Image: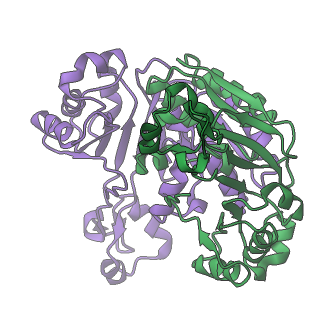
Chain colours: A purple, B green
Amino acid sequence: MIDCGEGVQLQLRNMKLKFSRLNRVFISHLHGDHCFGLIGMISTLAMLGRKGDLFIHAHPDAEKVFTPLLDYFCHELPYKVVFVPIKHGNGEVIYEDKALKVSTIPLKHGIPSYGFLFQEKPREAHLKNDMIKFWNIPIRDLKSIKEGNDWINPDGKVIENKTLTTPSTPARSYAYCSDTAYSEKIIPYIKGVDLLYHEATFAKDAAKRAKETMHTTAGQAATIALKAQVKKLMIGHFSARYEDDNLLLNEALETFQNTIKANEGLVYDL
Amino acid sequence: MIDCGEGVQLQLRNMKLKFSRLNRVFISHLHGDHCFGLIGMISTLAMLGRKGDLFIHAHPDAEKVFTPLLDYFCHELPYKVVFVPIKHGNGEVIYEDKALKVSTIPLKHGIPSYGFLFQEKPREAHLKNDMIKFWNIPIRDLKSIKEGNDWINPDGKVIENKTLTTPSTPARSYAYCSDTAYSEKIIPYIKGVDLLYHEATFAKDAAKRAKETMHTTAGQAATIALKAQVKKLMIGHFSARYEDDNLLLNEALETFQNTIKANEGLVYDL
């Protein structure tokens, strides 16, 4: 989960997502609309009988701020809440497993704020089962083939890897950047990602207000997407002043064609 | 506002209620589902430019628990949050103005918990304007007539009050009792109220669970309503285990006919 605003539990229920599948929360910054849902969610997970640790990746202050609340309201938690402090936003790897790497992106927002880059690790090629059977390849050699190597049969004949495998699904990447002022510093971190979520709080008519409050206009978000050559841009975090958020979408589309709006409840398949 | 759970802001918006009209919040007890919405709402009121004090009536711990959060997240509030500690649940008058009195009701729920009794003060009678004109009564005498006195005209003729006024609307009363185990101790406090909100977390099949967790069954809530001779009972705080809350309503109706369910978004006119 990325950020955890008030009402997150309601949203999880509406979306029919399983609370039990949640293991890590990445908090971009300690403004209320990005973290006030934590304490309620932690309580509810306890009521649901959670046992496994829950990891909260956030600015070091998070532990200081939320621990007294946990002590008061959740003093008999059946699981552990582990705060993992984020040290800096310059590409720090804050989580890694065999399938995924998560690292930080430097945002610019008055208080320490981090974007997150989720990178899937390259996956192994798929074996062509009919060819494996045809050449009668022993199981012990399959790992090497999956890793891209050719296979040499007992007679010394080289069977090319491409005849034995189909390429793996390309590894996917997703970058989340909110809240932030327009900042080209993030470009090297998000270069070419499959999907960039970037805030677009204001339209260009409020460019001055955007700068003052350290937010981005829709046009600026699109400029970032263009310069970073991302595949798709998703904009969100729209100010309540815009009754019709298509105004913001249209502004972004002028600069970057492949833009969509992050409407509430949207599920986007990469 | 009585209690302030997570998601309260969303609900205020959905119901199109004005945030600016809110001046006092009465917190029944410091369990998360009754107070985790406070900090977000306090932040939002600041963003909306509130100036007037906001009073939070709650257990004395509330100030201790929420002040560090306010210091961290809302350090430049344009208005004052005043925590007013509740001393006890035995009918303490915690708020009073010329139209309304609010006092506490002793609940039974593991941690200190208070119900709230809202009593409207008796209102003045309405003047019959045609009669006032007919008798040519001077303005200086109207106050006394509104208070129920007869009027004596310059010739010494007594004009009875009932010919000069129509009775005022009867003063209304509302009692809120949640969360609580079944407790007949509350009966003297809620005797004859126009509307009693009483929790009914469980049905009778879970009477044991209700007792353990210090909650009430729907049948028990109805028994309280009957014994206290209230005019109407509203039940709520239903456990998520009941897919159809009509089960709880029907259980209450067996004992107390004038029962309704406190469905989300319900507006009930007294």
Q: Quadrant of the N terminus of chain B?
A: top right
Residue B188 spot, x, y in % from top left:
85, 58
Q: Is residue B179 above or below residue A85?
A: below
- Residue situated in front as seen by the camera: A162 or B45: B45
At horizontal 58% and vertical 64% (from top left) the residue drawn is B262
- Residue situated in front as seen by the camera: A124 or B42: B42
Q: Quadrant of the C terminus of chain B?
A: bottom right
* Residue A58 visible in image: no
At horizontal 40% and vertical 46% (from top left) the residue drawn is B16
Residue B65 spot, x, y in % from top left:
75, 32
> How many numbered dots are placed on residues in this image?
0
The answer to whether residue A188 is left or right of residue A244 is: right
Q: Which quadrant of the view contains residue A181? A: top left
* Residue B188 visible in image: yes
Q: Which quadrant of the view contains residue A269? A: bottom left
Q: Is residue B144 above or below residue A50?
A: above
Residue B233 spot, x, y in % from top left:
67, 67
The answer to whether residue A25 is left or right of residue B254 is: left
The answer to whether residue A104 is left or right of residue A174 is: right
At horizontal 50% and vertical 41% (from top left) the residue drawn is A3
The answer to whether residue B254 is left or right of residue B180 is: left
- Residue situated in front as seen by the camera: A32 or A193: A32
Residue A115 spot, x, y in % from top left:
43, 32
Looking at the image, which residue sits at the far left? A254
